[in-house]
Amino acid sequence: MSATAPYAGPSPIRRPVAAAALLAALVSLVFGLLLAGAGPASAHAALTGSDPQDGAVVDTAPKEVTLSFSEAIAVGDDSIRVLDPSGKRADTEAEPRDLSEGGTVRYGVALHSGLPDGTYTVAWQAISADSHPISGAFTFSIGAPSETTVALSSQEAGGGPVGVVYDIARYAAYGGFVLLVGGSAFVLICWRGGASALPMQRLVVRGWLTLTAATLVMLLLRNPYTGSGKFADAFDLAGLQSVLDTKPGAALVSRLLLLGAAALFIAVLFGTYARREDEQERKDLTFGLAVGGGVVAAGIAATWAMSEHASTGIQASIAMPVDVAHLLAVAAWLGGLASLLVALYRTPDIGSAAVRRFSAVAFSSVVVLAATGIYQSWRQVGSWSALTGTRYGQLLIIKVALIAVLLAVAWFSRRWTGRLTDTAVAPSGGKKKAAEENTAPDEASDDVAPERAAQLARQRAVLTATKKKRIRDADPERSGLRRSVLAEAAVAVVLLAVTTMLTSTEPGRTEEEAAGGATAASAPAAGGPVNLSMPFDTGGQNGKGTVRIDLDPGRTGSNDLHVWIDGSDGEPMDVPELKLALTLESKDIGPLPVVPNRLAEGHWTASGVQIPMAGDWKIDVTVRTSDIDQVTIDKNAKIG
């Protein structure tokens, strides 16, 4: 619907021309800000190097193969496989060793000794820190190249039938969120009478059902989506448990819990609230529903922000709340648009005041979308070449074009809104006739049974509503508004699909970095990353190990923290609890608590760790290996 202020009267012809010029200027400004002053960022991890390199011919067999990535990844037992020319495993089939240090993310697998000459294939698959599966393959040769019988699947990680269903569920989840949040906001803010309208109730409830079902499907398919690609593994309990231990799995479970609270909100909105007649009581209930519903809606939006693109890269602590605001604005605009469309086509009671209120809501939503969208795109693109030469950039151009089309159609909706009036149910003669028709059954109601009287009353109500709707539908302004809003909704459906594709597409910056074989993540940051190694012993069984810490870029401001725990055997070690605290004793700052998230076995990470000033910081690490065995160790590090 209209993304502008309510219409104040007929516009001269020059106003649409001026609006078109203003729209063009806004689009230019968006792209100008998008590409100005870009700094380093990342989202999907990308392979940035290997040893041996792709296509290399080495004289002697290496002891191991290492792969470098642009950002943190989660790996499993078969994440890196090395196959000889006959297709047999040439690696020891152990879980890849984490060789990361500083700002470089590197993993390696050991090879068998005495490997013969020939061409070897390295196939890898992992999960990026933003929850998306990544995969690839390359070859190197020992002695001289040879023929190889290795035939790898052309299917990318996250592809195939499972990937198609998962992507459909992802799209359905966004659609359900938009209808649930936008429909509820439309009723509370724009049209409170809609709480009693059955079509509006159905719209919001269907949004809740869609989001709930899509979330369940994504949770069950998460394991095969990031692994085997087989539907049968959706019910593998071990795989499901491993999913629950990851950030995306925890986000999906949290979303389901919040949807339980949303169900209670819906019950009150269309139950108690719809039946409340006292104006003051209804106003108080409106405030309570707005606050409670806003908290639940923000929480559901946060399940996306905390597990996908916004949770990785620079300024994650800023990007996540910005992403929440972006999603809520999308829901308020597009969900409200769908609600208005339903109200115009399925209910006879919505008036011009409600339409104008939504016009103001739509305008506010577009302002928020513009601000947050520019910031998000700056983090993911950052250059003209990435905008025009990568799939992410091309999709972003399509998205901006669709928004421009949507705003252009909204301009016409605004014109119809300004002309909209609340016409009478019928002209004077028609009123008299309708009154006579509607009172005729009443005159004879004393002679009929109560059941028949109730039936006649229902028939009169339906007849009155039908006449009222027919008269309103005959209003040319209302018909024009319906057509305009229908066009907006059609564009919005395509826009939502493109937006969903963007969330699962490798950002342009990362794609360019991978193609160039270098990444900002592998370059030393000013100030230098902080690397610490701290042995510990909790005193219990299997209580000995080593904590390795990387703080990058190791300077004031926002830092990325990675923590690895190795057992006494040198293998990755999981512990029930890991906490950190930073203290600058010379300035009486701290302790500043840090609770990292588990990324993989023995690997924890936290983004946006803020270092307020440079100095000699004490880093306390608390490791708990059992219910009663715990130890806190500390070490000083020069930061900044």
Image (cartoon, rainbow, N blue to C red):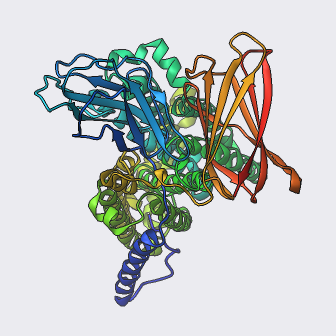
Q: Is residue 601 above or below residue 4?
A: above
Most foreground residue, 540 or 487:
540
Residue positioned 55% across, 55% down in the render: 314
Q: Quadrant of residue 470?
A: bottom left
Residue positioned 23% across, 40% down in the render: 56
Could you tell whether 278 is left or right of 484 in the image? right
Q: Which quadrant does the C terminus fall into? A: bottom right
Q: Is residue 608 above or below residue 567?
A: below
Most foreground residue, 358 or 177:
177
In the rendered image, is residue 456 in sight? no
Q: How many marks?
A: 0
Residue 310 in the image: x percent, y percent?
52, 50
Most foreground residue, 130 or 260:
130
Residue 97 in the image: x percent, y percent?
47, 27
In the rendered image, is residue 405 in sight? yes
Q: Which quadrant does the N terminus fall into? A: bottom left
Q: Is residue 542 above or below residue 35?
A: above
Could you tell whether 550 is left or right of 240 in the image? right
Residue 448 in the image: x percent, y percent?
53, 30
Residue furthest to the left in view is 147
Could you tell whether 422 is left or right of 90 in the image? right
Q: Quadrant of residue 538?
A: top right
Residue furthest to the front in view is 59
Q: Is residue 477 above or below residue 54?
A: below
Residue positioned 17% across, 22% down in the render: 85
Most foreground residue, 361 or 109:
109
Residue 142 in the image: x percent, y percent?
22, 30
